Image (cartoon, rainbow, N blue to C red):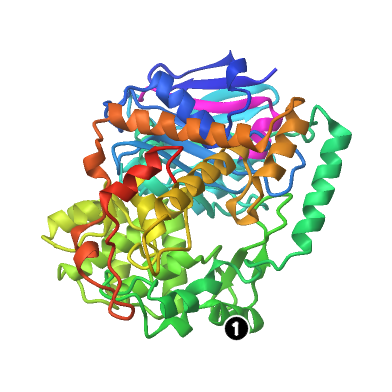
Amino acid sequence: MAKLLRVNMTDHTVREDEFPKEWERFGGRGLSAKILRREVPGNCDPMGEFNKLILAPGVLTGTAAPTSGRTSVGGKSPLTNGIKEANAGGQFGQKLRRLGYRAVIVEGRTKDRGTYVLTITSKGPELIRADELRLMRTYACAEQLGKNADKRAAFLMVGPAGELGYGNASVAITDLDNRYPTRHAARGGLGAVMGTKGLKAVIIDDHGTIALKAEENDDYRKKISDFVTTWRGKKNAYAKGTAIVVDMASEWGNLPTRNRRSGSFEGHSKINADAIFATFETRGGGMHNCLAGCIVQCSNTIYNEKKEYVTSALEFETLALLGANCGVDDLDAIAEFDRLCDELGMDTIETGAAIAVAMDGGVLPFGDVAGMRNLFAEMEKGTPLGRIIGSGAAVTGRAFNVERIPVVKGQAVPAWEPRTLRATGITYCTSPMGADHTAGLVFGGTKSWEGLAVKSRESQIYNAVVDSSGFCQFQEPPMEAIAGFYSACLGETISKDDLRNMGWEILQDEWAFNRDAGYTRAADHLPEFMKVEPIPTNKMVFDVPNSELDKVYDLNAK
């Protein structure tokens, strides 16, 4: 029988609840939204005891469905002050599902200022005090946890940024080999929710369990075989990782450069996929998968000139925000900063955006690698300057009186430029998640804005479904395929229309939470400079009228 695991950080108790039958079709992001809508006041303090942190694998996670092991982390965001979900790979979600849990709900807030670790095994859950781990970097924490845990155990944790309550704080999950905490549910500052509750880490050991069996097991195996065969018959767009789009983005005017003063970066060829692959030949490293059963294998492993491991993975968003957006064309420096973000438990998008805003405010020059390194040290020490940068781009911009602050609902705009990709700009404006490309990235809008809201709406619905299933978005599973997996897994007929309705219901839950948090439609806008300042190379601005944005909220609008 499926269960919910409740961890109360106020009285340090742990209990199991029966999983509500009416939520059977909801996992990951959708389940997180259901729990938050029912149990968390929208107007609560994100860092207070009434907010809750939700750790929810997808519906298919733990089964043999390919690339279906994503774990969603949800809560009220300290960054946006609204609902937030971020998900990551690694082994945590698969192991949690195989132990029979549909979600872990972390509630309350410790009053003794202690640091705690939750252990979950087949023998049951246990909350243990571990003050020696306080403010420990994630790599060191994973190593320490591994000394007393089974070698197959997976870890989920926060770094110093989460414990210090930073708006850029992420939740880290160990990779496939359970060595490095390199998979991050990064956006929205949810690491600060976990860290300020007093929960440093979760150890999960599913030793003795097996993959979950679908209700229609023979049919499920055939669907897996057919899906994998179809995937392998297509060109894998991510064979060289997401860094493959660096050149294309710069050519389109879609690569944020020097706090988005340009969409093209003169140093793009030094930080692209070819530059990364060149290091594989001389230093080692290569492409790999971050979780068991992955057929995409988009992750890379980066080594330095001494052939020492540095980080995994160096993604397009990181190369853009910590590279071009800060005026940095040094691939080794960007890899170093990516590793520091992993170590401290920070979102590379929010961190890169905040540093670029600080550069725009005169704190340090664009391209100043040594100065950036110093800012990371300030964040780790929790100095006033470090706390400002760690609080995100919006706070940094206000602190240094910067006019050009690229945020929506308090969250930094990702690399994908909304003036060039106006359909994605509509997603940034209307998504319950704020500026988040994973909520609905749409490649459209370079000529006319007409019809783009409908494309954004449908993309948002689709991504809500994918984020609830446990599938990775990079796998791009068709809605029909997801419906087939759901039907075989749950033992009932589920159509693609059923899933579309479910995706719409998820969005409705999230928008309703945000209304309770105080959001109105007046918040659905991009920064003013994006409406009037053209991208130099393509002369585009975000000129989509409110009447077009309105169509996102109308399921029947054309």
Foreground residue among 313 and 205: 313
The residue that appears at 56% across and 28% down in the rendered structure is 103
Residue 110 counted in the magenta span: no
The residue that appears at 59% across and 49% down in the rendered structure is 89
Foreground residue among 380 and 61: 61
Question: Is 85 on the left-hand or right-hand side of 274?
Answer: left
Foreground residue among 503 and 148: 503
Residue 98 counted in the magenta span: yes
Residue 360: where, in percent of width, then height?
A: 19, 69
Question: Is 252 on the left-hand or right-hand side of 96?
Answer: left
- Image height check: is 111 above or below 400? above
**Amino acid, disc 1:** Ala
Residue 328: where, in percent of width, then height?
A: 35, 77
**Residue 162 appears anywhere in the view:** no
Question: Is 317 on the left-hand or right-hand side of 492?
Answer: left
Q: Secondary structure at mark 1?
A: helix
- Give the number of marks: 1
- Image height check: is 318 above or below 114? below
Foreground residue among 288 and 150: 288
**Residue 407 appears anywhere in the view:** yes
Residue 553: where, in percent of width, then height?
A: 38, 38
Furthest residue in direction left, as rendered: 401
Query: Residue 211 occupies which quadrant of the picture?
Result: top right
**Residue range highlighted in magenta:** 93-109
Furthest residue in direction right, as rendered: 218
Q: Which residue is mark 1?
A: 278
